[in-house]
Amino acid sequence: MGSMQGKNAVIFGVANKRSIAWAIAQSLSEAGAKLAITYQNERLKQEAHELITSLPGADAFQCDVANDAEIDQLFAQIKERYGRLDALAHCVAFAPAEAMKGDFLNTSREAFRMAHDISAYSLIAVTRAAAPLMTEGGSVITLSYFGAEKVVVGYNVMGVAKAALEASVRYLANSVGPQKIRVNAISAGPIKTLAARGVGDLSAMLKNHADKAPLKRNVETREVADTALFLCSDAGSGITGETIYVDCGYNIMGF
């Protein structure tokens, strides 16, 4: 699968035990990584801190990825505590609830800006801050979804933001490649997470995926996490700028 022994990683986006970010944290921890895991703000501190510190070798830090000052502060702390960084998992996305309902045509300017700032630009911001600490090369991963390339009813502005995210992965891969830093996206099938509840009819989406996917089931959170481990470890050393589908094959199907 890939070892993370002696490696340091930072993970953005742990919300609760059902989040993909938490599964990635567990997978990397089990592989031997020392982890810095972030929570967004003071309101989420208690629940997040208890969850994060329950993982051996993991430390909790506050960081709102929409705030450049907090990003700078976080990476200053990471440099002081760990010295070097080997991997970064960006598991952050957000769009206002009203923008995930109704007609995409009615997306407001502010909802569009916010979705792209938090869901796509933040990957650029954290990668820029992490790169100087990846002195021996490294790996950056982010999470996408099939709605980035095909219309998924109810995904709306988030689909457009994920398209921007996937394009950013390719441009970032080219930017930091000379520093031996790899950048990839994982396009996961639908999973019952807190974030997914804001997307249209999740139950219908899950059923549709399971019916049409070649494996005739939905993907498990752990399968996404293990792919993240592969990409973060030296096992994925030749892969960069890619969007890797972990969706039981759903994306290959036509009618």
Image (tube, rainbow, N blue to C red):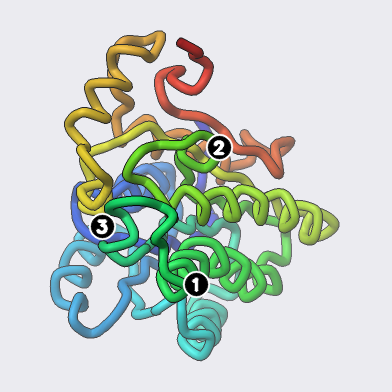
Circle 1: residue type = Arg
Of marks 3 and 2, which one's residue comes earlier in the chain? Answer: 3
Relative to 10, does residue 60 appear above or below in the rendering? below
Estimate how packed mark 2 is, as few (under 14), some (14 to 19) or many (20 or more) residues with alpha carbons within 10 Å. Answer: few
Element marked by disc 3:
loop
**Which label sits on residue 55?**
3
Q: Where is residue 188 shown, x and y percent of the image?
A: 42, 35
**Residue picked out by circle 2:** 149
Q: Where is residue 46 shown, x and y percent of the image?
A: 15, 76
Circle 2: residue type = Glu
Q: Nearer the viewer, residue 161 or 153?
A: 153
Q: Nearer the viewer, residue 149 or 45?
A: 149
**Residue picked out by circle 1:** 113
**Which label sits on residue 65?**
none
Whether residue 184 sits left or right of residue 193 in the image: it is right
Q: CA distance from mark 3 to mark 2?
A: 36 Å
Q: Residue at x 28, y 57 (%)?
A: 56
